[in-house]
Image (cartoon, helix red, strand yellow):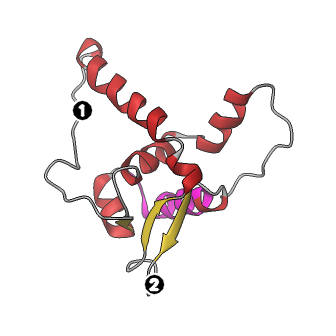
Amino acid sequence: MVRRMTKHFGCATEFTLHLLGGKWKTIILCYLKEGAWRYGELRSFMPRLSDKVLTERLKELELSGLIERSGPGGADAARYRLTARGEALRTVLGAIYQWGQRNAAAYNVAVDDPLRGRKRKPG
């Protein structure tokens, strides 16, 4: 379900978090900052995410202008990648990832790296 855009926000952080709202959008963006991926590839990185929610989040990110779908054929053949506006989030997304890596042990949790050993796909 695509959320309607509020026309006024109390601050810029509130607006940014509205666009990124929910953990899956930010995670999808983190994978896309590493390159363009097909739907099935994105799906394999997030096994706890349902197809329905992934489809909804990709649509929301497209509508917000943060990602675009490119390539021939249906959804499975197309690749998703960051737009210029999405690329502008690269530093923020990298900082979130690095913070998680550095602090996971302090919270007694383990984190995986599903992209390890995967080739980056050109945008």
The residue nearer to you, when weighing 50 against 86, is 86
The residue nearer to you, when weighing 54 against 62, is 62
Specify which label sits upstream in the sequence, 2 or 1: 2
Magenta segment: 49-61
Amino acid bearing label 1: Val
Residue positioned 54% across, 44% down in the render = 88
Residue positioned 40% across, 54% down in the render = 32
Is 92 positioned to the left or the right of 109 in the image? right
The prevailing secondary structure element of the residues shown in magenta is helix
Q: Which mark is residue 6?
A: none
Is 45 positioned to the left or the right of 10 in the image? left
Q: Do we see residue 47 in this rendering?
A: no
Is residue 15 located in the magenta-colored stretch of the structure?
Answer: no
In the rendered image, which residue does mark 1 sit on? 111
Residues at circles 2 and 1 in contact by the CB criterion of under 8 Å: no
Amino acid bearing label 2: Gly
The residue nearer to you, when weighing 95 against 55, is 95
Give the vertical position of 34 relative to 10 (above or below): below
Residue positioned 55% across, 54% down in the render = 84
Q: Do we see residue 93 in this rendering?
A: yes
In the rendered image, which residue does mark 2 sit on? 74
x and y percent of residue 110 in the render?
21, 28
- Secondary-structure class at tag 1: loop
x and y percent of residue 118 in the render?
18, 56
